[in-house]
Image: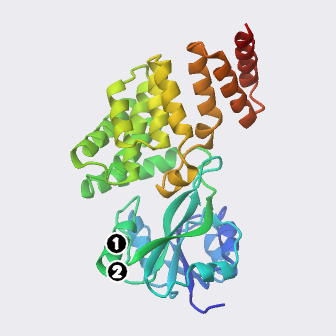
């Protein structure tokens, strides 16, 4: 092994359920693991030490960046891998990692693939970077390393590359109310410090919606949309406030074609925006628009979506998309096209009897 090549850095609190799997996936891949424990009351520290990790202790003060940066201050490797306890690295080899990180100095960071939820597409995230004191997180929640990485890259004319490694995320199961109630005050604090970051407004909206505060959710998303209108599109995640507002419109029977058209104009090749606009057109009973939007959606390359750091439910790009276009084609009298779409939906989800029934009906209509 190349000594001191790669250090893994984590912050944890009561992660005994996930931590062992995470650390096991790093065995033989990283040279050291530095863990900042923020007050665990379970076996987290014991598990970490059993894998030979360096465990640091820092009381939780509501600041994710402060905890992560404390860990970064203590890593020794040339490169840092940022990973959470409820994530694990898909099997790879040390040789592959050494080859991926062999750049002599022109690369400051690598984006690697992350699958946030099972059934969703992986996307590229900034997870490996050079161990240097000017690369640090900022933000009390939704902490980001990206601004400092971009600043270093631009200042020193360095590149940010792609490495074909894959992290799998294991969390987000069960009742998330306690997490929402913890995160909402942090988000409201962070949005004061970073009021133009639309991702914060989108997350505020999603938490409000989960807590049953539907109008407050719409207000957050609407504010995010207004920020994009004022500041322009600054990052791919700006699409999310448009998406969630469109979904809210469609689900509450108040579609807004002007908003959908605006979103598609700003994000013409974004699968999530095309899907949200398609649902808006369904709510407006505009089948011709639905066919056009779904056809555009199905033509978007998965690799393009991954490089834009956007994750999507895989069913949007196969089963659900074909079913939505099939329904629209059926309403337009294109029974042959509808049958083909229902058949495609059926291939992706053979256990859904509804697709088979609709295919058979469309085929019967086409034969008449």
Q: Secondary structure at mark 2?
A: loop
- Which residue is nearer to you in this view: 291 or 47? 291
Coloring scheme used: rainbow
- Which residue is nearer to you in this view: 205 or 338? 338
Q: Quadrant of the N terminus?
A: bottom right
Q: Disc 2, disc 1: CB below 8 Å?
A: yes
| Image coordinates for residue 294, horizontal then vertical, percent | 53, 32
Say the numbered circle drawn on residue 134: 2
| Image coordinates for residue 59, horizontal then vertical, percent | 44, 71
| Image coordinates for residue 330, horizontal then vertical, percent | 61, 16
195 versus 41 height, above or below: above
Residue under the image location 62 percent in, 45 percent down: 174
Residue under the image location 47 percent in, 85 percent down: 74
Residue under the image location 25 percent in, 54 percent down: 192
**Number of residues whose C-alpha sits closer than 10 Å to that of mark 2, classed few (under 14), some (14–19) or many (20 or more):** few
Residue 301 lies left or right of residue 185; in this view the side is right
19 versus 75 height, above or below: above
Q: Quadrant of residue 144?
A: bottom left
Q: Quadrant of residue 367?
A: top right
Residue 89 lies left or right of residue 204; in this view the side is right
Q: Quadrant of the C terminus?
A: top right
Say the numbered circle drawn on residue 81: none
| Image coordinates for residue 324, horizontal then vertical, percent | 58, 26
- Which residue is nearer to you in this view: 15 or 229? 229
Q: Which residue position is annotated with label 1?
A: 148
């Amino acid at each position: 092994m190349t000594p001191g090549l790669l250090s893994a850095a984590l912050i944890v609190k009561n992660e005994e359920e996930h931590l062992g799997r995470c650390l096991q996936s790093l065995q033989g891949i990283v040279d050291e693991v530095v863990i900042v424990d923020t007050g665990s009351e379970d076996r987290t520290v014991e598990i970490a030490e059993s894998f030979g990790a360096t465990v640091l202790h820092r009381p939780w003060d509501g600041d994710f960046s402060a905890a992560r940066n404390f860990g970064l201050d203590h890593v020794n490797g040339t490169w840092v891998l940022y990973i959470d306890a409820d994530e694990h690295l898909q099997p790879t080899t040390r040789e592959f990692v050494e080859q991926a990180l062999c750049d002599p100095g022109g690369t400051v960071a690598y984006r690697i693939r992350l699958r946030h939820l099972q059934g969703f597409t992986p996307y590229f995230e900034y997870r490996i970077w050079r161990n240097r004191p000017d690369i640090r997180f900022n933000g009390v929640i939704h902490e980001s390393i990206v601004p400092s990485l971009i600043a270093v890259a631009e200042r020193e004319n360095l590149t940010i590359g792609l490495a074909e490694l894959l992290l799998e995320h294991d969390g987000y199961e069960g009742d998330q109310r306690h997490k929402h109630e913890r995160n909402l005050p942090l988000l409201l604090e962070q949005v004061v410090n970073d009021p133009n970051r639309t991702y914060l407004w989108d997350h505020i909206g999603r938490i409000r919606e989960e807590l049953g505060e539907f109008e407050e959710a719409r207000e957050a998303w609407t504010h995010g949309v207004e920020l994009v209108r004022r500041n322009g599109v600054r990052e791919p995640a700006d699409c999310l406030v448009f998406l969630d507002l469109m979904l809210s419109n469609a689900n509450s029977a108040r579609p807004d074609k002007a908003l959908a058209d605006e979103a598609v104009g700003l994000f013409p090749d974004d699968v999530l925006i095309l899907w949200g606009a398609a649902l808006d057109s369904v709510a407006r009973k505009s089948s011709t628009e639905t066919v056009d939007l779904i056809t555009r959606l199905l033509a978007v390359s998965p690799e393009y979506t991954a490089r834009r750091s956007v994750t999507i439910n895989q069913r949007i790009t196969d089963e659900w998309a074909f079913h939505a276009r099939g329904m629209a084609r059926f309403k337009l009298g294109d029974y042959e096209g509808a049958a083909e779409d229902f058949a495609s939906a059926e291939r992706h989800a053979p256990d859904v009897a509804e697709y088979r029934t609709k295919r058979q009906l469309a085929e019967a209509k086409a034969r008449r």
